[in-house]
Amino acid sequence: MVDAGARADARPAPEDVDAASQQPTPDAAAQQPDARLPDAATPDAALPDAAVAGCTALPQTGSITISGATTAASPKWLRPIATTCPATADSSVGTAVPRMEHVLCNLGATAKSYDIAMNGVDEDATLTHPDPYLVIYNGMSIPTDTHMCAVGDDDGTSGSISVGALVANFSVAAGARIDLVATGFENTDLGTYRLVITAR
């Protein structure tokens, strides 16, 4: 995402076994572990946590940063024009744009709003993505109908500061997951990027 220690060996030590009598006692079967019951020797920490499996927890306060990259080998898609969602058309220049998906979840007890920025080379010279584009879907994956986005952005602004892409004040319900697609404007737009997700 631990070792509980060795399970006690149920077999008696050799010196405790009567060599003349190897027959099980009548209640030996009752002492055998029931495979249907949970293994008490397995600690909770070793079990997958269904609440966080498969997603990155959104912050309840402050912000988190996620670094990523798209390359020529990344999955590609016909990018919807997601400046309005649901989208009504596909891009004519982004017909096979590299993309990367990030599944995020709100593990808080209440809905929370977030500012989600995708930064590229214009925001940080150590990055290489030339033209970030964000598309966000409710759930854990891109739906069959890619037009069914929740929100998206290209060339966002935060006050007077330009960012590669910015979705501002996006609400995520308690326990909900979102699929954030980090992509580009055109087919040739790829490279390293940074996501900055800030709780409001």
Image: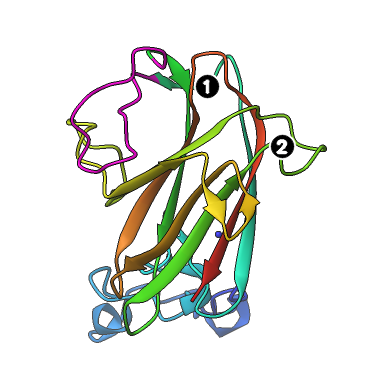
Residue 37 pos. (x, y %): 26, 76
Residue 4 pos. (x, y %): 58, 76
Q: Is residue 91 left or right of residue 184?
A: left
Q: Over which residues does the magenta segment extend?
A: 77-94
Q: Earlier in the sequence, mark 2 or mark 1?
A: 1
Name the element at disc 1.
loop
**Residue at the (56%, 84%) spot, across then down:** 16
Residue 150 pos. (x, y %): 27, 50
Question: Which residue position holds label 2?
Answer: 122
The three-letter code of the residue at mark 2 reads: Asp
How packed mark 1 is, by other alpha carbons closer than 10 Å (few <14, some 14-19, many 20 or more), is few
Answer yes or no: is residue 43 visible. no
Answer yes or no: is residue 60 visible. yes
Which of 185 and 101 lies nearest the eye of the viewer?
185
**Residue at the (59%, 41%) spot, across then down:** 164
Give the mark toward the camera: 2 or 1.
2
Question: Which residue position holds label 1?
Answer: 74
Q: CA distance from mark 2 to mark 1?
A: 22 Å
The circle on residue 9 is: none
